[in-house]
Image (cartoon, rainbow, N blue to C red):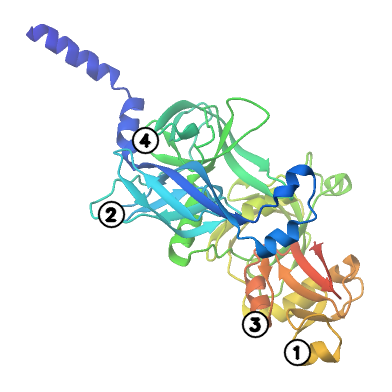
Amino acid sequence: MLGQSLVFAEQSYNRRTPLVRAVEKVSPAVVNIYTTEISRSARNPFRSFGNNSFDQFFKRFIPPIESQRRSLGSGVLIDGEGFILTNEHVIAKAAKIHVILSDKQEFDATVIGADVKSDLAIIKITSAKPLPYVQMGRSDDLMIGEQVLTIGNPFGLQHTVTTGIISALNRNIEAGDNTVFTDFIQVDASINPGNSGGPLLNINGSLIGINTAIYQKAEGIGFAIPIDHAKRIVDELIHYGKVRRGWLGVSVQELDAQLLRHFKLDRQRGVLVVGVANNSPGGKADLRRGDIIVAIDNHEVKDKSDFRGRMASYTVNSSIRFSILRDGKVMGRRVRVTSIPESYVEEFTFIWLGLNLQENNEHFARSNRLATSKGMVVTEVVPKSTGGRIGISPGDIIRQMNQTRVDSEKDYNKAVAEINNPDRILLLIQRGRQGYYLTLEP
């Protein structure tokens, strides 16, 4: 009997592979997330007969019907205080967030901060007892072919473990509206609906990424945000509730075939610097017009979209190493990005956008017969400037910049301060009683 016990113990030990130990180590810190979105809409019972003429009547006089939609996702506890890292799209528009741990403990969670650009969010739960958590690892030393595992909540099946390998690194994914997510880790571990926000782990149980996307056109391909990118975003969300993105003060353009030949580049890579703001971080670091930025922190820059996506992950006070090509020689420049100072807003608006602006008010609106007393009024447009080329005219009113509402000069200054790359700016312009969107690319 003793011999059989020893054999059984040895077999059990041999079966406890590094993969099993990694799952045992991390599972308690992985959470299942349930969100409830409440929408209120008045229903027109005649719509089923093809008659929608009573829609406005029912919206105005009939009490709305409350409906709920529950969605599933995953997350991972990153410290003992109850902070949970997940995807922004998992908790977006949620009226209620409910969290379940592996030991079946249940908690209501609150949103600490969320960031659409990186698709990351921090939520928090409160417990009287210490909570398990996973410390963040690193993703700058990942190897293609390295074994990885995911733990998540696919299709509501709690704490499901899948495993696979890293298939590729530095993948870029287009997400519509010219949005490009960069540097994804591509894995062949099964990542299904409900895995979003869950951890990607190496064989040692270290957190190396956050599962975030499924490639719709193929099976068995998933993507994760590298944890090195997530660290910068997480720190901002916990401390500020939002991401204060850094400003470089440099405008770039795509390299076409003619420019590639001119600069003797053998293939499509890099972006050409076409403008550097005075006293900007880029200017202070000796970036110059005519430089070609070929790499950011040792990651090759493929094109303008790639450049924009990589820069979006850097926050205020981040230190970035650029590799630039100048006069046929590759050299390095280190830049510490900042936010756009309020003292520079007027100069930025004039030089980069080609506009002079004035805060709107009731007296100004009446005197100039404007349709609203809110926003920033265009008083001058520089000929052949960015604003002039795209058709902005004196009297137009800026009502929104990059999804930030502009009702006053204070709002406008805040919106400008949040710009990290001024080479593409989305404006909502009001002309008379009509509103339309314009994309400025200085």
Left or right of residue 360, residue 431 in this image: right
Question: According to the image, label 4 marks what residue?
Answer: 205
| Type of amino acid at the residue the image marks with label 4 | Gly
Question: According to the image, label 1 marks what residue?
Answer: 362
Q: Is residue 390 above or below residue 382?
A: above
Task: Give the CA separation, mark 2 to mark 1.
Answer: 51 Å
Q: Is residue 27 visible?
A: yes
Residue 170: image x %, image y %?
Answer: 60, 39
| Type of amino acid at the residue the image marks with label 3 | Ser
Q: Earlier in the sequence, mark 1 or mark 3?
A: 3
Task: Give the CA separation, mark 2 to mark 3.
Answer: 45 Å
Q: Secondary structure at mark 3?
A: helix
Q: Earlier in the sequence, mark 4 or mark 3?
A: 4
Question: According to the image, label 2 marks what residue?
Answer: 127
Q: Is residue 434 above or below residue 52?
A: below
| Circle 3 residues within 10 Å: few <14, some 14–19, many ≥20 | few
Question: According to the image, label 3 marks what residue?
Answer: 343
The answer to which quarter of the image holds residue 365 is bottom right
